Image (cartoon, grey):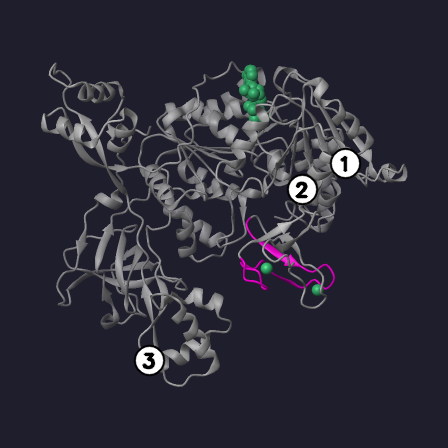
Amino acid sequence: MTAAMVIGGDLDHGREERLTSSVAPTLGQWVSVLVDCPGVEEAYTYGVPAGWTVAAGDIVEVPFGQQLLRGIVLQVLSDLPEAVAAEQVRPLTAVVGTSFLPVGYWHVLEQVAAYYCTPLIQVVRTALPPGVLGRSQRRLRLRTTAIPPLSVGAQQVLTFLQKSATGDYSLRYVAQHVPRSQRGIAELVRLGVVEVYWAAPPQAQAQWQQAVVLLRCDGADLSDRQRRIVDYLRQQPQDCWLQDLLRATGSSPKTIQRLVERGYVAIVARQRCRLDQGMAVPADQPQGLTLAQQSALAAIVASLGRTQEFLLHGVTGSGKTEVYLQAIGACLAQGRSALLLVPEIGLTPQLTDRVRARFGDRVVVYHSGLSDGERYDTWRLTLLAEPRVVIGTRSAILLPLAGLGLIVLDEEHDSGYKQDQPQPCYHARTVARWRSQQDQCPLILGSATPALSTWQGAQAGHITYLSLPERIHAVPLPPITVVDMREELRRGNRTMFSRLLQNALKHLPQQQAQAILFIQRRGHSTFVSCRSCGSAIDCPHCSVSLTVHLHDQHSQVLRCHYCNYSQGVPQRCPVCDSPYLKPFGSGTQRVVAELNRLFPDLRVLRFDSDTTQRKGAHRQLLAAFAAGEADVMVGTQMLTKGIDLPQVALVGILAADGLLHLPDYQAAERTFQILTQVAGRSGRGHLPGQVILQTYVPEHPVIGAVKAYAWQEFAQQELASREPLGYPPIAS
Ligand code: ADP
Ligand code: ZN
Ligand code: ZN
């Protein structure tokens, strides 16, 4: 049950000024305002009505064209800019919220905009949760039923509009559904058939709910039902939500009403904070640290309160997370908040649970998978000075945390920290550096396989190097056996499992052990087909199926392997218009099918983007696997991160080659990182671990380095080989 928590934040409680008369006000001052309107990027000058006080950072409402939009005050100007004529300046119409951003935070947003060459408003949009500014939308609506003769294009738009119940669509939606709609729309507007207008979407708002407050609990005159409620409330540490109380006690609203009348309880409206609280986890205590952990922690704690960057380099299972947790504890004890960034939140339920177990209610999570309401409330919560632990993905680095005292990037090498699209593209590590400078706090970069740029910074001494060279309890790293798959083929083994791997899989049940089989996402391209009519999406030039490629973390493109033609993945089947278009025959599915055929007794789970789409699915699959409900888990890159399962003794890497052949100067670095991470899932408990790495190029130097866990040698070699080519990090 959620406690009846109240959150403040100036957005709701700030002073509010609003122009009421239609008489032009005398203007006292000028401000430059960043308005939130698609396509508008520069700041505009507005007048401040006499008697109003406005400061940089305030959220205001301004007239813009025919609209009223929200915007942020960038600067208060004592003089009107020369290029602006006084009679063109319009007054602000309202101050919606007073400045709420911490000092210095705005500076970081400006740094992001400048460094990544992005308009400031784009950065602001990424930083603020949806609904603070409110973006207007251009919409199209029917004005008349008297239709003059129309061109074909205009008729298409009109027919589309007429199909909707209200005759009203956003321009974007029309453009997506009616090809080349622009001229048609222009014609319809000219003829007065439709009009284009701006509509502000509803603002995100705090949610108000009824809470029950216990006023007295003496009375011997209570009925049993009333008594039950009073007793229940007495046992709660905080006030209860009415809804929750009714459910928990099985009472009727009437009984509670009766208690209100008799003065036992009061019902009050409170803001309900919508947070992604997850499930309750049992509390845990800090562990006694190893010597290596102790010295790492001491260095970090000594740096609290100033800007310093650390690389915490430790093999998988060496206790990095425990160091983060204790450093965060020290930061909280000093009354400041900590930010723990992870590459992908859904993939790290175990880490999130550990942080919750340690810090309880002070933990909040922030990522793009939250609902708008959750993001809005979490964001506002971070504005308050109370020390908190925020776990989040890359966008959390732009949270306006008041009193930031520590930043941790777990798996700092991970490409999930880089945003390419939508704008602004930025790297969370870079922004984290600026914030650590701005807020004078340490930044910990943790990894078993640091990014080469980070490694180089540590070598050059800009970054303080902290090392955890051994696994906890000196558990050995699992030995890696490399299998040449060409040889397997020569010996007549046409399956995707080498004989060694087959043998190991066969013995799993006997050892009461579990296995993870890994295939990399890329290189196993798939095609898209319609579940309704069965047609696949073909190349318009070559009539072969287009295959799905990951464009970036979030979007996919379809590409033709013959002519390189590419297009986006359509929402609906081009043949039958069914929405059930699905990628088909993914690599993991094939592996599972093969496993079932060869080892009918092994119970297999699939862990990939298909099976983990639903909210909470990662957690459920992992929990099922941890509970021993399956012997083998087959998965992609998703499996590599933050999974600590003691029963996993065998890791099989089915084909490492696709990674190596990526046309990217970082291919070797990424391959080393991913393979090492995957291997690290094995042998974390009492069972001795084993890793079988299958490849068609066993002689490749990266494979050799992975096998030997030779990170330093690999890093030196790789840096040396990039130097003559001028590739980063040398060049940067
Ligand atoms: P990493 O983050 O480097 O992969 P973890 O912090 O997850 O390593 O530690 C691996 C395992 O060892 C975890 O189960 C953790 O609870 C345990 N552990 C960490 N530090 C200690 C310690 N000092 N003593 C005993 N166990 C520890
Ligand atoms: Zn179809
Ligand atoms: Zn083609």
In the image, which is nearer the foreground, mark 2 or mark 1? 2
Which of the four quarters of the rendered structure image does ligand 2 lie in?
bottom right
Whole-percent x, y for residue 709 in the image: 72, 29
Callout 2 secondary element: helix
Tag 2 near tag 1, CB within 8 Å:
no
Residue 609 in the magenta stretch? The answer is no
Q: Is residue 562 left or right of residue 334?
A: right
Residue hosting label 2: 589
From the viewer's perspective, is 535 left or right of 329?
right
Q: Which amino acid type corresponds to the residue marked 1 in the rendered image?
A: Ile
Q: Residues within 10 Å of mark 3 (few under 14, many from 20)?
A: some
Q: For the residue marked with disc 3, what is the amino acid?
A: Gly
User: Is there CB contact under 8 Å for labels 3 and 1?
Assistant: no
- Whole-number angstrom distance, CA of label 3 to CA of label 2: 55 Å
The 10 Å Cα crowd at callout 2, few under 14, some 14 to 19, many 20 or more, is some
Q: Is residue 235 above or below residue 625?
A: above
Mark 2 C-beta closer than 8 Å to ligand 2: no
Q: Residue at x 24, y 70 (%)?
A: 86
Q: CA distance from mark 2 to mark 1?
A: 26 Å
Give the residues drawn in magenta, as a range: 554-578
User: What residue is pinned by disc 1?
Assistant: 703
- Mark 2 and mark 1 lie on one chain; the one further toward the N terminus is 2
Tag nearer the camera, 3 or 1: 3
Residue 234 position (above or below residue 587)? above
**Earlier along the polypeptide chain: callout 3 or callout 1?**
3
Task: Give the label on residue 192, or none.
Answer: 3
Point out the image quarter for the N terminus: top left
Circle 2: residue type: Gln
Q: Main secondary structure of the magenta part?
A: loop
Q: CA distance from mark 3 to mark 1?
A: 68 Å
Total labels: the figure holds 3
